[in-house]
């Protein structure tokens, strides 16, 4: 019975296929066929190309002079957020308060670290004056820049005079953080080049400090997760200072290779900040390695 039903089903399918309407094959006129070749291969000249032997060209690694060569449309907020700007000012103000706690400690060596802190503060306020957001203390930033720049320059030596000025500026900063303003601010020099705000040496000390702090915080994915805010902060400060040392008036600024190293460092630090905010450990590790290698390569050619 089953076999009979199977035969009936097959016969029905055959009839259906036979009745299915199909398109007729095309018919070409002699004029149509004249545009085609009977044997196209007979008309080719030379050996057939061997595409399997071709390899894709390797991309050349960009040198330091090629990194971020176009700074058109640059914005400080892409490197240093207003929160990181304010936080760095508060941290350096606290450092200066400790360094000026006693004249003995200041003159015994604290003046060197005070010079670094004042220099970083002067640069922070210089950035604040040009920042594309509306950071805190922006209205007084140019005057604070010049006031703290002078304090940093005078802290090259540890004397009674430099201590008195440093202690006075420390009090100004404490008042500023609490919402006040220094009693007397200088008229800012609108034409001063960036190189007059601070020397490169103390800024490089802060950059080196940032790199050293980043190492332990990037020891593992867990440590990055625990310290992601501090990693982002140090990376942003590093990125901003890497940009600053390429600006007018700084030693070696304008040298293509030097600027290339600085831009590579800047971009790697900015990438690290983004990775820290996303707690992306692999990306953060690559960015940190790039920072370390760039610093090593640059220091082989340039001195602080």
Image (spheres, rainbow, N blue to C red):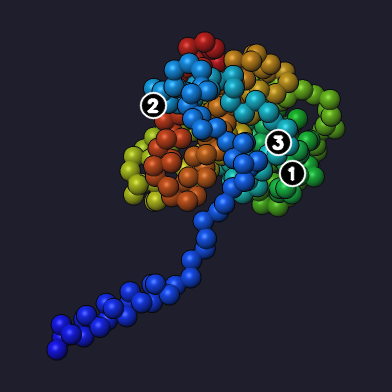
Element type where label 2 sits in the image: helix
**For marks 1 and 2 on the same chain, the one whose residue lies earlier in the sequence:** 2
Q: Can residue 103 be seen in this view?
A: no
Image location (x, y in percent) of residue 245: 64, 23
Q: Name the residue under label 3.
A: 74
Cα separation between marks 3 and 2? 45 Å
**For marks 3 and 2 on the same chain, the one whose residue lies earlier in the sequence:** 2
Residue with the most extreme front position: 30
Image location (x, y in percent) of residue 263: 59, 26
Element type where label 3 sits in the image: loop
Residue 92 is drawn in which quadrant? top right
Q: Which of 115 and 14 is in front in this view?
A: 14
Q: Would you call the spot at circle 3 few (<14 residues within 10 Å), some (14-19), or many (20 or more)?
A: few
Cα separation between marks 1 and 2? 53 Å
Image location (x, y in percent) of residue 7: 22, 80
Image location (x, y in percent) of residue 157: 60, 18
Q: Are marks 3 and 2 in contact (CB under 8 Å)?
A: no
Residue shown at the point (78%, 42%) measured from the top left: 140
Q: Which of 16 and 208 is in front in this view?
A: 16
| In-image side of 196 versus 224 (left or right) | right
Q: Nearer the viewer, residue 131 or 94?
A: 131
**For marks 1 and 3 on the same chain, the one whose residue lies earlier in the sequence:** 3
**Image quadrant where one finds the C terminus:** top right
> Is label 1 or label 3 in front?
3
Cα separation between marks 1 and 3? 10 Å
Q: Would you call the spot at circle 1 few (<14 residues within 10 Å), some (14-19), or many (20 or more)?
A: some
Mark drawn on residue 132:
1
Residue 20 vs 125, above or below: the answer is: below
Mark drawn on residue 52:
2
């Amino acid at each position: 019975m089953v076999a009979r039903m199977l035969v009936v089903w097959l016969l029905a399918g055959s009839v259906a296929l036979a009745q299915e309407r199909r398109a007729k094959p095309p018919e070409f006129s002699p004029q149509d066929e004249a545009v085609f070749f009977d044997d196209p291969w007979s008309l080719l000249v030379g050996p057939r190309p061997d595409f399997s032997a071709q390899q894709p060209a390797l991309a050349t690694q960009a040198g330091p002079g090629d990194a971020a060569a176009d700074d058109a449309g640059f914005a400080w907020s892409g490197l240093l957020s207003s929160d990181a700007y304010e936080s760095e000012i508060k941290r350096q103000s606290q450092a200066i308060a400790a360094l000026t706690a006693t004249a003995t400690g200041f003159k015994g060596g604290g003046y060197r670290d005070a010079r670094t802190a004042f220099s970083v503060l002067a640069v922070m306020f210089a950035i604040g004056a040009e920042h594309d957001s509306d950071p805190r203390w922006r209205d007084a930033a140019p005057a604070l820049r010049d006031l703290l720049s002078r304090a940093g320059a005078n802290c090259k030596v540890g004397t009674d005079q430099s201590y008195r000025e440093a202690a006075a500026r420390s009090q100004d900063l404490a008042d500023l953080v609490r919402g006040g303003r220094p009693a007397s601010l200088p008229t800012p020099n609108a034409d001063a080049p960036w190189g007059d705000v601070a020397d490169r040496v103390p800024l490089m000390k802060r950059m080196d400090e940032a790199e050293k702090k980043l190492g332990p915080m990037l020891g593992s994915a867990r440590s990055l997760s625990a310290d992601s805010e501090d990693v982002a902060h140090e990376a942003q400060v590093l990125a901003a200072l890497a940009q600053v040392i390429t600006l007018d008036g700084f030693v070696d600024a304008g040298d293509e290779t030097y600027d290339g190293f600085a831009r590579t460092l800047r971009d790697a630090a900015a990438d690290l900040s983004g990775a820290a905010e996303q707690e992306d450990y692999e990306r953060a590790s690559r960015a940190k390695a790039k920072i370390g290698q760039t610093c090593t390569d640059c220091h082989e050619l340039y001195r602080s």
